Image: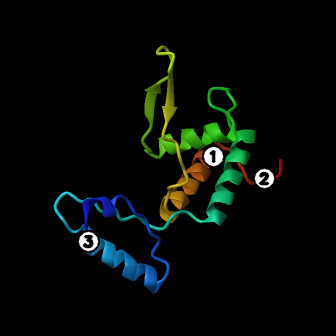
């Protein structure tokens, strides 16, 4: 296989045919210098929906040092607390900086479950019942 043919590919192993295709790709990629990445299944739509419900409840009931934060900001706060990597980049003006890297879309089923458990535990530790009626 020519080097240009094997740029970058991703596949979800959800059918026997796709598993066979992945095996073929793996065989072709088994050359010195090629990289192979294995990932657990991505978080489900149901997990994603519950995650944003949790964040909405947290943003209505929780503060940090008296400050309130949006659902998106809480997402970043919890992802950072769980050890997700963030990078701070310079803005085009050369004077200010901004964080990047707080994405939850690539979390696995297990990682999303762990994150939701962490959020609920954090709220409970701070005496906030996020599931009570508002």
Taking the image as shown, residue 128 lies to the left or right of residue 90, namely right
Q: Earlier in the sequence, mark 3 or mark 2?
A: 3
Q: Nearer the viewer, mark 1 or mark 3?
A: 3
Label of residue 123 in the image: 1
Select label 3 or label 2 by which is in front.
3
Q: Secondary structure at mark 2?
A: loop
Q: Residue at x 16, y 61 (%)?
A: 32
Tag on residue 42? none
Q: Residue at x 46, y 15 (%)?
A: 94
SS type, badge 3: helix
Q: Position of residue 23 (x, y in %)?
A: 32, 78
Residue labelled with disc 3: 28
State how far apart marks 3 and 2 are (Cα). 54 Å
Farthest-out residue, left: 32
Q: Position of residue 79 (x, y in %)?
A: 51, 44
Q: Which color scheme is applied?
A: rainbow
Q: Is residue 106 left or right of residue 22?
A: right
Residue at mark 2: 132
Q: Residue at x 56, y 40 (%)?
A: 76
| Marks 3 & 2, CB-CB < 8 Å contact | no
User: Which residue, as the protein is rendered here, is positioned at the far bottom?
Assistant: 16
State the residue at coordinates (71%, 40%). 59
Distance, label 1 to label 2, CA atoms, is 12 Å
């Amino acid at each position: 296989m020519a080097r240009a043919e094997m740029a970058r590919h991703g596949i979800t192993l959800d059918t026997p045919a796709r598993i066979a295709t992945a095996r073929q790709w793996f065989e072709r990629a088994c050359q010195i210098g090629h990289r192979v990445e294995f990932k657990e299944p991505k978080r489900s739509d149901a997990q994603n929906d519950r995650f944003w419900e949790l964040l909405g409840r947290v943003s209505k009931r929780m503060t940090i040092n008296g400050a309130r934060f949006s659902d998106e900001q809480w997402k970043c706060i919890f992802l950072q607390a769980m050890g997700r990597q963030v990078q701070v980049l310079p803005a085009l003006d050369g004077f200010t900086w901004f964080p990047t890297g707080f994405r939850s879309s690539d979390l696995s089923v297990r990682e999303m479950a762990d994150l939701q458990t962490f959020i609920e535990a954090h709220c409970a530790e701070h005496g906030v019942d996020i599931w009570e009626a508002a």
